[in-house]
Amino acid sequence: MTIQYTVTDVAEDTTRALWQVTYQDSSGEVRHHIFPKTTLEWRAAEYGLDDVDEILDIILHEPHAPAEQQGAPVSLLAAPATADRPRPRITLYTAESTAQARDAHRQRIADIKVNVRITPPKGADPLDHIRRNHGITADGLRAKREQVDTHRWKTLHGGLPMPAEEAPNA
């Protein structure tokens, strides 16, 4: 059975640069999801996303991942398992490309939605406040993408390529 939560409120903490999204289920249980404002820009940079609605949907569903995946950007299985080797998982930093990382994370969120759905209310949507004030900038995206790409390269290849000034003379 899928648990359905409806967003009831959004609060902005400008002092600590946080968003707080409040939602509740049909029995009246209330939950709060508090996250840094920069999370939207980070998800856009990490996964090459540009749709604020999709970014918000991802952020709101991430905390509902199974406990063994909490805090781990783990998703699609990369290769078939063998008797001596379990299937490796594609993560943000082990994906060969941003597109592969994005596909894996989208699948992870789709898997979460089998059990948990977070939706806006009928009528006025409190998430509109975040949509209007998301804070994603071209400069911020560029800087964060560079950090993600550098970390991914180091994870996959063990370090950065040698700078030109250190390359041996040919």
Image (cartoon, helix red, strand yellow):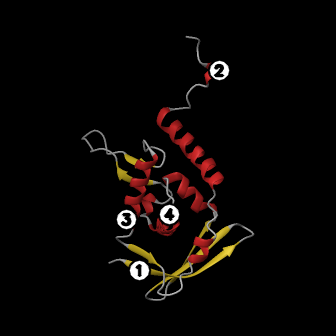
Q: Which of the numbered marks, if any, corresponds to residue 4? A: 1
Q: CA distance from mark 4 to mark 1?
A: 23 Å
Mark with earlier residue (4, 3): 4
Mark with earlier residue (2, 4): 4
Q: Is 34 left or right of 55, judged from the image as shown?
A: right
Which is closer to the viewer, label 4 or label 1?
4
Residue 132: name its quadrant: bottom right
- Secondary structure under the numbered disc 3 in the rendered image: helix
Residue placed under numbered mark 2 in the picture: 165
**Percent from the top left, x then y, of residue 41?**
59, 58
Which is closer to the viewer, label 3 or label 2?
2
* Mark 1: few/some/many CA within 10 Å (<14, 14-19, 20+): some
Mark with earlier residue (4, 1): 1
Mark with earlier residue (3, 1): 1
Q: Which of the numbered marks, if any, corresponds to residue 110? A: 3
The residue type indicated by label 3 comes to Ala
Q: Which of the numbered marks, if any, corresponds to residue 51? A: 4
The residue type indicated by label 4 comes to Asp
